[in-house]
Amino acid sequence: MIELQKVSKYYGQKAAVVDLSFKIEEGEIFGLIGTSGCGKTTTLKMINRLVTPSSGHILINGEDINSQPSETLRRHIGYVIQNVGLFPHYTVQQNIATVPRLLQWDDQRISERTQQLLRMVGLEPETFARRAPDELSGGQQQRVGLARALAADPPIILMDEPFGALDPITKQQVRGEVKQLLKNIQKTIVLVTHDVGEAFDMCDRLCLLDQGKVQQVGTPRELLFNPQNDFVDSFFKSNRLQLEMMSITTGDILEILQSSADTPRSFSEGFEGNGPRAAANDSFFSVFQDAKPEAHSYVIYDKEDQPVASVTSEQLLSGFYRVRHKLKEKQG
């Protein structure tokens, strides 16, 4: 979908990024993370030609982005930034309609698309369409910014610190909603964030940068448990346990429990359990974070949303540490 081939950017003698090469697959959420000033935003902006590379090539679907006018390129790439950037003199509806109007959509099509997107991001059109941006909360503005980026149904969305300006409580809520939305709409997403927990929560794969150079590209689990160098290993040290909890799923835990003497009770045996539900692809961190004090067991559901086993709280915790130990053994 998106490929960078030995891409570099220099400002005078100063290198912003050097020889970046990686591929972003269609439909994945790909995160750019790293130290401050490592070139994350520069890399993002080169994809839609807001910044011009000094050398190298960027391809989208095999075609060099320089083969078409920048305006045409950007109409097929949505862009969401930290401070939203809504036009203050436009209503919410007019902000969302910006790109469709440039594409000369008719009024009815624009109106229908605007209402569809507002509902998609959790804002009722009857309430919010005619409001000005300064009448919205920070979280509501961020939702409108996302709706505007999706307005012309672009296949690619670039997101530059989209939740950075939100307070922690609003950030967690909006991020969860956006994560679910992005999974549902199946766009190719490139996300820049300085928040490693956010990257682990949202992204399928990550590119870790330092001083403008790629240190490692892989899944969050690969970077955490199979670091390619000392920098990658040290980058995650400060919150390693939380990240391990985020990268190990209840499915991983169920698998290791089923291969041991501590086998959970299976629904295939006719057992009917009760208690809070947990999907096999839920991270242990999300289950742990939402744990109910009175819950003694959890019902695990598979990818087809069918109940497969009942696991006690003690089994979940024990299973997490066993999976963690197994992954660390592989690393060693």
Image (cartoon, helix red, strand yellow):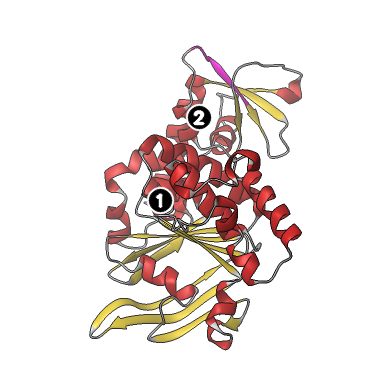
Q: Magenta stretch containing residue 18, yes or no?
A: no
Out of 317 and 298, give the one closest to the viewer: 298
Q: CA distance from mark 1 to mark 2?
A: 21 Å
Callout 2 secondary element: helix
Q: Which mark is residue 287?
A: 2
Q: Which mark is residue 3?
A: none
Residue 155: percent from the left, percent from the top? 63, 65
Out of 38 and 70, give the one closest to the viewer: 70
| In the image, residue 42 above or below residue 139 | below
Callout 1 secondary element: helix
The kind of residue on which mark 2 rests is Val
The kind of residue on which mark 1 rests is Phe
Residue 111: percent from the left, percent from the top? 70, 54
> What's the magenta region?
294-299
| In the image, residue 125 above or below residue 235 | above
Q: Would residue 326 be seen by someone viewing this image from the given angle? A: no
Residue 12: percent from the left, percent from the top? 25, 86
Q: Disc 1 designates what residue?
A: 225
| In the image, residue 260 above or below residue 222 | above
Residue 325: percent from the left, percent from the top? 41, 39
Disc with the residue nearer the chain's start (1 vs 2): 1
